[in-house]
Amino acid sequence: MASWQPVLVIALICLLVYSGACSKPYYTVAVYEHNRFVNNSGPAKLTVNKNLAFYSKAAKIAKEKDADILVYPEYGLFSPSQNRSEIRDFLENIPDPKTVPANPCEEQEMYSQRRILYSLSCIAKSNSMYIVANMGDVQNCEGDPDCPSDGVFMFNTNVVFGRNGELILKYHKEHLFFELALDLAREQQLSVFQTDFGSFATFISFDVLFKRMSDVAQKPWIDAILLTTMWAEFTPQIASIQLWQSWALGNNRTLVASNVQIPGYYAVGSGVFDATKGALAYTYNPDGVSKLVIARLPRRGYSSIPPNPMTIAITSNHSFHFKNEGQHVTTDCSRTVLNDTSNIHEEYRCVEERTDNYIFEKLHRKSAHMEICHNGMCCILDYTAKKLTEDYYLGVYNGTHNFFERYFIEEENCLLVRCESVGERVCAVYPRSTKTVFHHVQLRANFTTRFVYPTFLDSGMRLVPKSEWSYEVTPAFGAYEARVNFKSQKGRNLVTVGFKGRCYDRDPPYIR
């Protein structure tokens, strides 16, 4: 596609569909972090309707704040399941808008038994807003040699609705994370759609760690990636907001991420992350309260504008501007130390990345130069701290990242991190807060990949504003060198500073 064609399409949409949105130099995006309602003993309809009621409430509030597009989370309407018969009651047959035009809100009789599609369409239409949501798609597959024994394919699916309620896209998740009751997407799909204010692509959760999403992000006409997720908090480098910001910066593409708010299931953290400025608006507070995060983004061709960020807490009884970010972040969240919890809406848990094969070297002085290497990758640190109040380590790793002995990806990692040992294991757990104040940190490392994702994380799971640190990746003799630099007279309580290099071309084939 020629580079001018998406611009022409958007211009035509502006003239024919919604001229109001095109008169502004910006568009407003909202993400809804939902504390999902579940009733395991009740009918599927009860669970879905209760959650849809919250979706509708969030959309009305977003509309009051002039949102042009609203992104709901993955598994916001029902829980994931490993049982096909259990989850099927929550799924609906979703038409393919490329072949079957559909506006469920205007076709009530046809969609009377497809409550989710009908409701989402009507939410979009009644609020004149684009809607990105996650649901389940069930498709008859009799006659297909790969058809499961129950005669249907069942997919984890994103749907996109236009301002008038029309279905404009459906996308099947291409990288399932367990989800054994569901089927993998049958083919690689076009996940791109046009609006009256830009061009976007949508993906789902685990997709973020793979090359496909980064490839789409490199297309020059894509304005942002819209991600629905139920993300598990992996410390020390891929906790939710930490990953969302680093991915946006590393790919030079804005990322909008909507997560569920179920802290006992390791899920919390959503926001809007600019390609160069990092976090514009985000929430990370594991309190079991749903929140709407809103920010303005400049339309293509316009210079930067104030993001006007806001977070609104939404309960069953009322809504209010939320000001207590990070208040419920505890120092310890590790299931290694705390075990799992049945109080999933109020107790905060996280899991650790596998770092058994990392090389770690402890920081002993308040200021030093350090260098460590692993498998040809070297990590160089210069730092100055007021005092080392807790244990900090410099870590490096070049090899395979292992998710629960099931999923494998290739990485080159370098990090300065606060961590604690458990028994014989060095850096077994990663506390979320610290009293140690750093005034200067410079971290450098060599990589074989250009996809290098930087992290700067403050105490209490707060992202250090991008204005306070610099980041660059430069070609160097057929490889790459990455560098981050932080210098502050006041200082910061840093818990993690690092790089995660993703070696997509070395990845083994994805097998679900």
Image: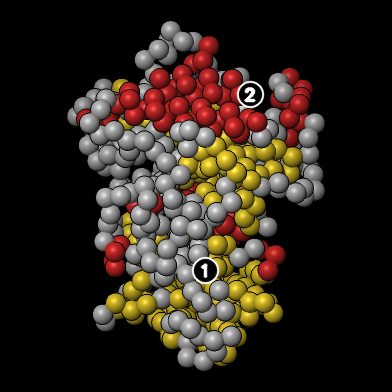
Per the rendering, the mark at residue 128 is 2
User: Which secondary structure, mark 2?
Assistant: loop
Q: Position of residue 59 (x, y in %)?
A: 56, 30
Q: Earlier in the sequence, mark 1 or mark 2?
A: 2
Q: Looking at the picture, does residue 1 appear above or below residue 280? A: above
Residue displayed at 55% across by 68% down: 458
User: Which secondary structure, mark 1?
Assistant: loop
102 or 78, which is in the foreground? Answer: 78
- Under mark 1, the amino acid is Ser
284 or 401, which is in the foreground? Answer: 284
Per the rendering, the mark at residue 201 is none
- Under mark 2, the amino acid is Ser
Q: Residues within 10 Å of mark 1 (few under 14, many from 20)?
A: many
Question: Which residue in the rendered view is the most extreme toward the left?
Answer: 149
Quarter the N terminus occupies? top right
Q: Looking at the picture, does residue 117 appear above or below residue 157? A: above
